[in-house]
Image (spheres, grey):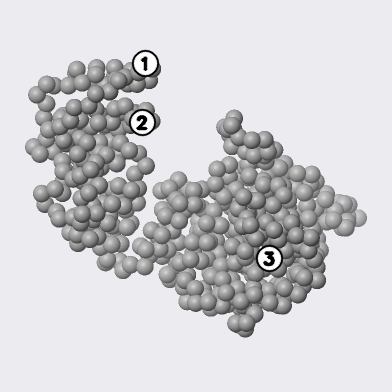
Amino acid sequence: MVDQVDILHMNITSALSIHGWSHLDAIILASLSTESPLLLVGPHGTAKSLLVEKMAGALDMEMRHYNASLLNYDDLVGIPLPEENGKSLRFVATPGSIWDAEFVFFDEISRCRADLQNKLFPIIHERKIVGIPLSTLRHRWAAMNPPAPDELDGNAGSGEYYLGSEPLDPALADRFPFVLGVPNWSDLSDKDRRQLISWKNGDDDEINNNLIGGRSLESLVEDCQKLIPELESEFEERLSEYIVYVIDLLAQAKLPQSPRRARMLARSTIAIHAARIILTGEDIELEESAELALIYGLPQNCSEVSPSPAIVVSAHKQAWEISGLADTDDWRTVLQEHDPVKRVLIADKLDFEIDDLSRLITQALASEESDSRQLGVATAIYLSFRTRRNLLPSAWEPLITLASKILEPRIIRETVSAGFATQTWTAITQWLDRRPKDGDWIEELSQNFVLAGFPDMWKTQKWDEALAQFHKDLELFGVKESA
């Protein structure tokens, strides 16, 4: 283990004069320690290539830097010549061929021809080319600009889209255990910006003196490699449970992962945890390492629209909480349900305590992005619980505030302007005219719900679809005509 004095100075990227990347240090060390492919995704001029060049130099490795947009297959393998027997080929290596490389960097990989991308598969995943093992090759990194979306924003400024950058083949993207979005100028602190433009930035003597407390990057990699097996043995069971749940939750969030990615995430979590221990020397939490592995380990990070961090972190937190519970724990049953609204129903059936049920209700209301669904859910829960369950004021207050918009008699006067509002109001009045005048309880709730949402909610949501969802929520919570 590294001495505590040295640990306090360990900052890999800053030591290489790459400023603003320190939050990625553990990911980078994990990739180097497991010799796992890593993909850098970011705008031009963000030091992607510079980082790799300095990294290979710090490791004293023979490096090949290929611009994939200009690459030909012969550039990789050299000059093919037939053997004397005429039955096979041999390759005459050129100074730029891959055979003796230890560190390979494929820049602009998203601009690479499709046929050549296929030829990069075995290099990145298996360290082979034309079926021949690349015995000296250890690290395979790549970089790309974010792909342009299918529909361009006309208000976006010039230079915000990379029209020549295409999404990677999903199978190729799935070969990279680490997919890192890199910081742009707007992501840098004032200190990082000043260091970036400093005249002294990049001074080789300064780099050599400051690199990780005077230690070599190679020694850090070795320490991390030694620690990984110990951590795998310690956390295998806990991590296996977590990965199973988080993969299912990601799929529910429309971020499906392959079985290969599930295995990668388990391995990456341990590697990142080991790297964080080596770099900080602290007694750190595995949960934080798992979150980092998830944030920087999804192939969708290199797609046109990268996953929302909030969705990814939410899946992580839920999976971590579930995996830490006993099989017989009622909370496990509740948290296994992805829908926050249905969690309230399950908790009610399991007779949860007031505090816990109230917390689940407030979480369910807060999770709803649709105003109409929030209104409908609050009304359904209020009508279901008002006479049979005690709740905390923190839950009753939002329930009553929302439900009152439907349940309390009110007279509202609205001036309907020409255009969309008029069309919507005409459709609603026609619907009202068809309703029975002496309708039941549900009929009255339905009419009040539609009127309560006019005009503001129906500007962004379809009132008839929202009404259908309201009926489902009433039924879900057992609110019937006899109420």
349 in relation to 426, above or below: below
Q: Which residue is mark 1?
A: 418
Q: Amino acid at mark 2?
A: Gln
Cα–Cα gap, marks 1 and 2: 19 Å
Q: Nearer the viewer, residue 425 or 483?
A: 425
Which quadrant of the structure image shows residue 94? bottom right
Q: Is residue 57 visible?
A: yes
Which quadrant of the structure image shows residue 56? bottom right
Residue 461 disc label: 2
Question: Where's residue 408, x and y in %?
Answer: 16, 35
Q: Amino acid at mark 3?
A: Ser
- Are the residues tagged 1 and 2 within 8 Å (C-beta)? no
Mark 3: secondary structure? helix
Along the horizontal axis of the image, is 152 left or right of 420? right
Cα–Cα gap, marks 2 and 3: 49 Å
Mark 1: secondary structure? loop
- Viewer-side label of 3, 1: 1
Q: Identify the residue at horizontal 30%, vertical 20% (top origin).
A: 415
Q: Earlier in the sequence, mark 3 or mark 1?
A: 3
Q: Which residue is mark 3?
A: 14
